[in-house]
Image (tube, rainbow, N blue to C red):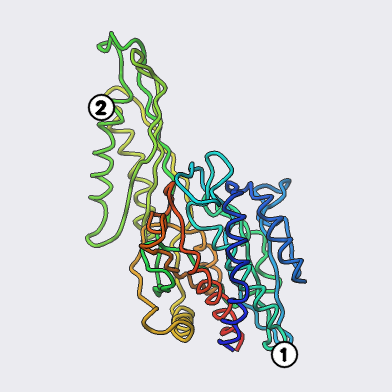
Amino acid sequence: MIDRIRSEVAALQHRLVEWRRHLHRHPELSFQEHATAAFVDDVLRAEGIHTRTGVGRLTAEASGTGVIAVVKGEASPSDRCFAIRADLDALPIQEVGKPAYCSTVPGVMHACGHDAHTAMVLGAGIALHRLRKEWSGTVMLVFQPGEEKEPGGASLLVKEGVLSDPKPAGILGQHVTPELSSGLLGFRSGPFMAAADELYLTVTGRGGHAAVRHRLVDPILVAARLLPVLYDEAHAAVPPGEPMVISFGKFTGNGATNIVPQTVTLDGTLRTFDEGLRARLHVLLPQVCTRVAAEFGATAELRIVKGSPVVKNDPALTTRMREAAVALVGADRVVDMDIRMGAEDFAYYTHVMPGCFFRLGTGNAGKEGTQSGLHTAAFDIDEEAMLTGAAMMAWGALSEMQ
């Protein structure tokens, strides 16, 4: 059967590239993926695959932008069900460089590979549908919105119960990775990716004319003094060897050359693997901000938005998926991964059912952009790797039907 999977996916190669490039040209931000969802729905329905649209709603009144599809094997009756997942959203990044399939949407691009993830799950689903008379069970195709933005589309799908009819026995997800050579598959059992929380810090001083600094409380200066203390005290609270990251990536102060602003804001992230440490830092960090700001006569408020939990790869399922990968591509093409401080809302699935999240290498020194990092303006993939990714999703799901 593994050869049949390879053959069906290979026959779809030109369509995998077509789908991915169409999505790359027309990216949509988190929870705005209306055209993307419609495209996915059209492709699946054209193959005769049943779909359900409008899932992943931010509010009860809103229409969701997720798509759920089911592919049923017809060899014999079976109540086995397994899910494979893709994410639909793009990022607010202006693409640079680039080939003919560059983003046509100013300031928005698929810089995290979700276009490829979607194309590969489409390919896996269609390959399984074309082979449906040769296997039994049900494979659920999950195309979720909003992976890049809280509350995370995965959390919404779990809350809506859309993964309960039918209920998968487990779920498989993948992520393209430029740091691995094209076509390599990377696995890790147990905790794999960090829990992620959003940090929103507001520092308020006393603004005014920059020429009379002695009358002012400069919130820019206070924030600059506050950050090193915050970093130091956060790290001091972490047990030796326990991974943790705190980082701020955005600083906004609406002043001018001769105007000290009243308020500055900073946006950041907190990444942890231990829930106890996470809870302690949620208490400690606002206290540090308040205390340090007060020393300068300012005030500071740190708002923490709790995000996705740790991605927990089920050990038994991950072992089986690794074995399936070895059967598909050979032991020399399967590697072990270290933990990653990046976050993934696939984590929500892994807390309600067995899950396995693996990495697909897409780096190729001979192809421009394919070694650029995730979330960068020059990011691209070696599209040849999509053959491996689609085949792994199809074969991984099918191996769970036995």
- Front of the two marks 1 and 2: 1
Q: Position of residue 331 (x, y in %)?
A: 38, 84
Q: Which image quarter is the N terminus in?
A: bottom right
Q: Which residue: 32% across, 52% down? A: 245
User: Where 382 sits versus 137, above or below?
Assistant: above
Residue 139 position in % (x across, y down)? 65, 76
Tell me which residue sits at (35%, 62%) in the image: 365
Residue 270: image tag: none
Quarter of the view holding residue 342:
bottom left
Pointer 1 residue: 75
Considering the image in quadrants, where does the C terminus appear? Answer: bottom right
User: In the picture shown, does residue 363 fall above or below 261?
Assistant: below
Q: Which residue is under mark 2?
A: 295
Q: Quadrant of residue 73?
A: bottom right
Q: Look at label 2 and name its amino acid.
A: Glu
Label whose residue precedes the other's in the sequence (1 or 2): 1
Q: Amino acid at mark 1?
A: Ala
Vertical order, 13 against 150 (above or below): below
Q: Count the numbered circles shown.
A: 2
Q: Secondary structure at mark 1?
A: loop
Quadrant housing residue 185: bottom left
Query: Residue 96: where, in percent of width, then height?
Result: 45, 44
Q: Residues within 10 Å of mark 2 (few under 14, many from 20)?
A: few
- Circle 1 Cα neighbour tier, 10 Å, few/some/many (<14 / 14–19 / ≥20): few
Frontmost residue, 220 versus 364: 364
Lateral position of residue 290 relative to residue 16, left or right: left
Q: Tag 2's secondary structure? A: helix
Left of 155 or right of it: where is 272?
left
Residue 170 point in image, percent of width and height: 57, 75
The CA span between labels 1 and 2 is 72 Å
